[in-house]
Image (spheres, coloured by chain):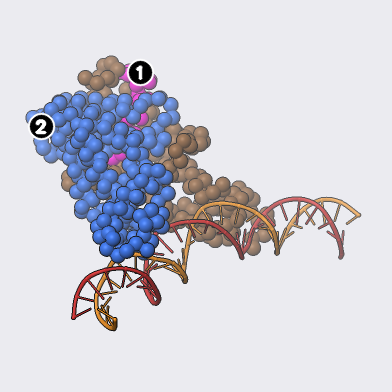
Chain colours: A blue, B brown, C orange, D red
DNA sequence: CATAATATTGAACAGTGTTCAATACTAACT
DNA sequence: AGTTAGTATTGAACACTGTTCAATATTATG
C-alpha cells in the first residue's frame, strides 16, 4: 500500500496520465483499462476514481495533453515568415507527420464522442482552438484580399479538409487505387483551394 | 429454445444485423453487445458466434450495409445531368444530410479501426470505392480540362475534405466561433477548390 | 499515548467478449 | 414405431471490464 502523502493528488493525476498515454501508444485505445493504469503507478483502482471522475474523464484529460503536444509539435515546425501557401503546406505536412508518428494518441483524439446533447468542456475547446489558430496565422498574409471573417472561415475549411484526408488515409479508407501519399493529397487541396481563394475578389458564394 | 431449422444461418445473420443496426441507431456504438443482439432475435450468444467470427466482424458487416445504404441515399439525391460544381454541391449536401440523419451508424463507419498491420477486407474496400465513385462521376464534366488520373485524384481529395468537415462538425471539434453550417463550409470548399482546379491548365504541382 | 481525520484499499456488482461440453431436437433407417 | 446418428442450440464458465464504497491503514493533532 502506497503510504498516504507519498504523492499529492496532482502528482497521482500526472503519473496516471503519463502511464495511460504510454499504454495507449503501445496498445491503442482499447488496451487502456483502469486497473492497468492503477497497477502501473502502484495504486489501486479506487485511488484512480478519487482523481478522475471516470475513464472517459481520463481519456479527455489525455486528449487535452495530446492537443498541447500537437500544438508544440506544429509550432516547432511552422515556417513563420513564409508566404501563405508555403506556411500552409508546411503546417499540413507537420500535422500529417504527427498523426503518423503518434497514430494511437491521434486516433483517440477523435474516438472520444460526447453523448448526444453533451458538449465538450470549455477548456478542451480552448486547446482545440489554439491548434486551429495556427492555420489562421498561416493564412494571415492573404488578409489584403479578404476580410478577417473570410480568412477565419477559410482556415476552418482548410484545416478540416486536411484533417479529413489524414483521417481517411490513416484509417485506410482511401488507398483504393491511386497511390497518392497523404502529403500529396493535402498539397493538391491547398494548391487548388488557395488558387481559388486568391482568385475570388469578393465573398465566396456559389456560382 | 428456438427450434433448429426455424431459420437458416443466413436468416439468423440478417436478423442479427438488422437488430444490431437498430441498437446502434438507438443507443450508439457502445450500446451494442452480443447478448443484447442474441436476446433480441430470440437466440443465445452461442448462436451468434456460429454466424459471426466475433463482435468486430459483426460491426464490419453492419458497416458494409451502412455503406450500401449510403450509396443508395446518395444516388437517390444526386443531380445526374448537372454541371460538375452543382453535382458536387448536391452530393456533399446529401452526404452531410446522411451523416446528420444516421449519426450513430455513420460514426461507427469510422470507429472500426483495423489493428496495426491488418487491412480492411476487399469486399469492404469495394463498397467504399463504390460510394467514392459517385464523386468521380460528378467531377467527370471537367474531363476536357484534366486527365482521367487527375480527376480521380481530385475526387479523392474533395471527398476526403468534405468528409473531414462533416466529421469535425458532427463530433463538435469545429464550432468554436464562426457559426457556419456544415453545408456552407462544404460549399466554400467546393467553390474555391473547383475555381482553382478549373484555372489550372496542367498538372497540379505546388507554386 | 489516544483520538480524530483522511488516504487507500479491495471486495462486490453488474456488465463485457468468447468458448465449448452438454443438451435438445430432427431426420434417416430399420 | 422405435432406434440411432447427426447437428443446431444452449448456457454455464472464464477472464476480463467500469464503478462504488464500507472497511482498513496511516498520519497528524491534542
Question: Disc 1 marks which residue?
Answer: B147
Q: Secondary structure at mark 1?
A: loop
- Of A125 and B85, the residue lying toward us: A125
Q: Quadrant of the C terminus of chain A?
A: top left
Where in the figure is residue D18, as x and y percent of width and height? 39, 59
Q: CA distance from mark 2 to mark 1?
A: 34 Å
**Residue B145 is one of the magenta-drawn residues:** yes
* Residue occupying the point 35% across, 55% down: A41
Residue beneath the point at 51% across and 34% down: B122
| Residue A50 image-quadrant placement | bottom left
- Name the residue rendered at 20%, 45% in the picture: A129
Closer to viewer: mark 2 or mark 1? 2
Mark 2 crowd level (few <14, some 14–19, many ≥20, 10 Å Cα): few
Q: Residue B200 appears at what percent x and percent y?
A: 25, 19
- For numbered disc 2, what is the local secondary structure? helix
| Residue B160 left/right relative to B12 | left
| Residue B30 in the image, given as x and y percentages of width and height | 42, 55
Q: What segment carries the magenta color?
A: B144-165
| Residue density around tag 1, few if under 14, some if 14–19, many if 20 or more, within 10 Å | few
Quarter holding the N terminus of chain A?
A: bottom left
Q: State the mark number for residue B38.
A: none
- Residue, disc 2: A143
Magenta-colored stretch includes residue A184: no
- Percent position (x, y) of residue A34? 39, 57
CB under 8 Å between discs 2 and 1: no
Residue A206 in sight in this render: no
Q: Quadrant of residue A147?
A: top left
Left or right: D22, with B19 as reference point? left
Q: Provide the major secondary structure of the magenta segment.
A: helix
Amino acid at each position: 500500500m502506497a503510504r498516504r502523502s507519498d504523492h499529492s493528488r496532482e502528482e497521482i493525476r500526472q503519473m496516471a496520465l503519463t502511464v495511460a498515454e504510454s499504454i495507449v501508444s503501445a496498445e491503442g485505445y482499447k488496451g487502456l483499462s483502469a486497473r492497468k493504469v492503477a497497477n502501473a503507478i502502484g495504486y489501486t483502482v479506487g485511488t484512480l476514481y478519487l482523481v478522475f471522475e471516470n475513464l472517459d474523464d481520463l481519456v479527455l484529460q489525455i486528449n487535452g495533453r495530446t492537443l498541447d503536444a500537437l500544438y508544440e509539435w506544429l509550432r516547432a515546425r511552422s515556417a513563420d515568415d513564409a508566404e501563405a501557401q508555403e506556411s500552409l503546406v508546411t503546417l499540413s505536412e507537420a500535422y500529417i507527420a504527427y498523426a503518423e508518428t503518434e497514430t494511437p494518441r491521434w486516433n483517440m483524439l477523435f474516438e472520444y464522442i460526447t453523448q448526444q446533447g453533451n458538449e465538450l468542456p470549455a477548456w478542451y475547446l480552448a486547446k482545440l482552438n489554439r491548434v486551429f489558430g495556427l492555420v489562421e496565422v498561416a493564412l494571415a498574409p492573404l488578409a489584403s484580399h479578404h476580410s478577417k471573417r473570410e480568412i477565419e472561415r477559410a482556415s476552418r475549411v482548410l484545416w478540416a479538409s486536411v484533417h479529413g484526408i489524414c483521417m481517411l488515409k490513416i484509417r485506410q479508407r482511401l488507398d483504393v487505387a491511386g497511390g497518392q501519399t497523404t502529403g500529396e493529397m493535402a498539397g493538391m487541396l491547398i494548391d487548388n483551394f488557395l488558387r481559388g481563394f486568391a482568385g475570388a475578389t469578393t465573398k465566396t458564394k456559389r456560382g
